[in-house]
Image: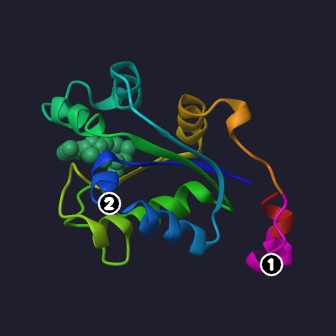
């Protein structure tokens, strides 16, 4: 099944939102296959946000990602990348729809609670950035047949 990366950002950790955020993904039926608390080094911030290093807000973004640890989560499910992006909402939390994580938990375009991979291709790169192969887990679930229909189980192996 498809995997995606979520980073629970330092602002969410400071605000005590970790449980609420993880619960949303669990309730949806996305499977947690990796989870790790860490500080983001200069190198990892620069690499993760390489597409933004030239932007004027980059120093603020960098400081915000190093203000406390982050929690990296690898989530698995059918079309996990798009499903998680929908659940997270648009970048500017003030514009994010109610019911999304950013829409419900943030007022900010920068301190927007979580990162989520934006494509299957980027998800692969980002998962490898944060997890060594031995830190991801493949395990059986007794409820998979109640989470997906028969046709879906064939399609999204
Ligand atoms: N960001 C910001 N100001 C902006 C755009 C982005 O502070 O005008 C920050 C914000 O924290 C965002 C991160 O940079 O989550 C990465 O930006 P991206 O465009 O990749 O948005 P995302 O994929 O997180 O929605
Ligand atoms: Mg992005």
* Label 1: how many Cα within 10 Å (few below 14, some 14–19, many 20+): few
Q: Does the numbered disc 1 mark a residue whose Cβ is under 8 Å from ligand 1? A: no
Q: Is residue 141 magenta?
A: yes
Task: Name the one closer to the observer, 74 or 86.
Answer: 74
Q: Is mark 2 on a helix, strand or loop?
A: loop
Image quarter hosting the C terminus: bottom right
The label number, if any, that marks residue 90 in the structure image: 2
**Can you tell which quarter of the image residue 20 is in?**
bottom left
Residue 60 left/right relative to 134: left
* Residue drawn at x 17%, y 29% as measured from the top left: 59
* Residue drawn at x 37%, y 40% as measured from the top left: 69
Image colouring: rainbow
Q: Where is residue 12 in the image (x, y as percent from the top left)?
A: 32, 55
Relative to 91, say whether 38 is above or below. above
Q: Position of residue 39 (x, y in %)?
A: 39, 32
Image quarter hosting the N terminus: bottom right
Relative to 67, say whether 98 is above or below. below
Please give the residue where the numbered disc 1 appears in the rendered image: 149
Residue 71 left/right relative to 83: left
Residue 2 left/right relative to 145: left
* Residue drawn at x 23%, y 51% as measured from the top left: 111
Q: Give ligand 2's quarter of the image.
A: top left
Q: Give the range drawn in magenta.
A: 140-152
| Residue furthest out toward the top | 43
Q: Does the numbered disc 2 mark a residue whose Cβ is under 8 Å from ligand 1? A: yes
């Amino acid at each position: 099944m498809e995997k995606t990366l979520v980073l629970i950002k330092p602002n969410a950790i400071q605000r005590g939102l970790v449980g609420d955020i993880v619960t949303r993904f669990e309730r949806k039926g996305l499977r947690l296959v990796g989870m790790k608390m860490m500080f983001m080094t200069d190198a990892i911030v620069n690499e993760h946000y390489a597409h933004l290093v030239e932007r004027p807000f980059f120093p603020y973004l960098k400081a915000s990602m190093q203000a406390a640890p982050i929690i990296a989560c690898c989530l698995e499910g059918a079309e996990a990348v798009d499903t998680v992006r929908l659940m997270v909402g648009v970048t500017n939390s003030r514009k994010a729809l109610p019911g999304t994580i950013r829409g419900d938990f943030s007022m900010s375009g920068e301190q927007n609670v979580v990162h989520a991979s934006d494509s299957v291709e980027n998800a692969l790169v980002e998962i490898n950035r944060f997890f060594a192969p031995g830190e991801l887990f493949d395990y059986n679930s007794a409820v998979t047949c109640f989470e997906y229909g028969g046709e879906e189980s064939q399609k999204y192996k």
